[in-house]
Image: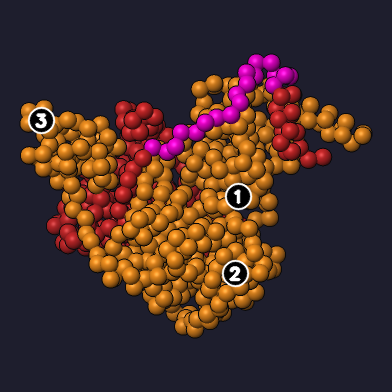
Amino acid sequence: MKIVVLVKQVPEADKVAVDPETGTLIREGITSILNPYCEYALDEAVKLKNAHPEENIEIVTISMGPPQTKLALLRCLELGADKAYLLSDRKFAGSDVWATSTALKEGVVNLEPEFDLILAGKQAIDGDTAQVPAETAEQLGVPQITYGVKVQIVGKKVEVKREIETGYQIVSARMPALVTMSKGSNIRRIPSMKEVLNARKKPLEVLTADDIGIDENKVGLKASPTQVARIFAPPEKVGGEIIDGSDHIDSAKKLLEFLIANNYIKE
Amino acid sequence: MLKVDYEACTGCKVCEKVCPFAAIVVVPETKKAKVLDTCTLCGTCVNACKFEALSIERRAISEEELAKFSGVFVWGEWEKKEDDNKIKKVVLELLGKGRELAEKLGETLSVILPGYNVEHLIPELFHHGADKVYLCEHELLEQYTTDGYATTISSVIATEKPSIVLYGATPNGRDLAPRIAARLALGLTADCTGLDINESRQLLQTRPAFGGNIMASILSPYTRPQMSSVRPNVFSKPNPDSSRTGDIVRVKVNLSRIVIRTKIIEEIVSKDDSINIEEAKILVSAGKGIGDKENLKLIEELAQELSGTVSGSRALVDLGWIPHPQQVGQSGKTVAPTLYLALGISGAIQHLVGMSGSDTIISINNDPEAAIFKVSDFGIVGNMFDIVPEFIKQLKEYKLKKQDK
């Protein structure tokens, strides 16, 4: 059995800041990480592999990104993936959701056409759009189950516990299928020294558009139906009244007065 | 491809300064700009270059092709509530914005309403601005499924050829919209915070990018319809006009069980009211500054005294102190209560984008430099563990006094 995990490398979002003077990003010290939700998806794949030794599961991770995305893929190999492919080419630059999912689809079709299950993070923490996995599923022609917290393989079907607004649902689909993962019970972990050393022996291939036979007119900016017209700094907010709270009795009183004056206290 | 015209380039380094991704540099030896692999073709440098030395090749489509598409469509998402079906609030919010867009374009506003036993929901859609409702009833649409809904809506779009389709960025909306976009090879801009029509009659879609640190205006220049999703609470709900009415188009839905490849085996509905922070009027929100899980009790007590609901920042969800449905912010929910109390929340941009639409924001933080104060209507720089218990005490006294009167 083959599980493909689609991953993305993202900047560690909390550490990104914008210069209010120039409106550009302050780049110093920003590190890139494996998107946490992609890591949960990988963890779920590893759990399935361990739970089903009879299936002889192979875990293959695929990412599209600049050359430094190799680091995120190395992390995947450390955390239990067996093989990693990076689709990296200037021809992919400027790809929006559609063009990114096209590249990922072509990657899957050309590299691992015999896949049974695709796992992906529910969203990336830099864009938070949650759209690429679903578009990839549609392009591959497989069903999708989004917001999974637990995945089980039952015969030829995948059974997923997923988050919905009012609680949870258990949904099943025949494989091949694509499942996106929320956090669930997975936690981000640090790989052991043995895993780190082992990962260096696993295959990690960097491939260009030509290597996987993608027509360059299907990817990148030219193939992207959405285009960024303008980038600008978010409008600066002007704050209200800020008081010194060193006298806690007085500041609690002022807070109460503010709430009463604005009709927020219900009797 | 981003191209540099070496004759025009003066090596002024403006591009280097404005690039959000450090993807263009001026090589000292040649004094000419060089594009690096990290370039995302966002176009910021092209706009900034005074010498027209930078250009991006973009594709164009004829005016006649674009003119074939007309009308603003909204997906009419509904939910089961106490055994009855109810239109989701975000749909009404989208009708308000959709009305504005339709009027600017001189086009009509329609709702695509897939479901089963949902005809009685139509008047509310007319009251909030819809001119037309495409009613797609089928028993296989009684429950939301990706395949059933994507197939139904795609076929309405393909035949009716609207110029714009809007979706609520709810969990189902995020499951559905990309599926339709991929099926029809269309652009999709998720989580828009602003929608407008530009002078070329294009939909100008504004959304936070790169973790909310910058805003991006996005166009879909050569595909129609232009599709966007918008989170709940981003636009305001229009005032209903109960005299408004419109046309109902009954769509014949061709759907068979084979099309729907997923099966809902079980649904576990949580009875916990606190989960729905999107509809709460008052939110008492905690951040990393509360220090200890035990201190959540203080937050809960305060929420109870104010008849509010507890929510929190991503840090608390990551620690497992509060469940994910109660998370406010870019990777959680966008909220717009009448009152938002931020306790021990520093105000990372990802948090601010999820709550800055609140009517009144109050914050308590011991760091005077905390970004949360910039969006607060009332802020206290101080120790919340002194102030909050004292406030609860005073509030109780005040309520007692009121009762006595």
SS at badge 1: helix
Residue linked to disc 2? B126
Q: What residue type is labelled 2?
A: Phe
> Would you say A56 lies left or right of B14 here?
right
- Name which residue lies at 45% across and 50% down: B194
**Chain A shade:** red
| Chain identifier, orange in the render | B
Q: What residue type is labelled 3?
A: Lys
How far apart are the two marked residues, 3 and 1, measured between alpha carbons?
A: 53 Å
Q: What residue type is labelled 1?
A: Glu
The mark found on residue B31 in the picture is: 3
> Is A136 above or below relative to B341?
below
Image: magenta residue range: A233-251
Residue closest to the eye, A110 or B1: B1
State yes or no: residue A241 in magenta. yes
**Could you tell me residue A94's position as x and y percent?**
25, 50
Which mark sits nearer the N-terminus, 1 or 2?
2
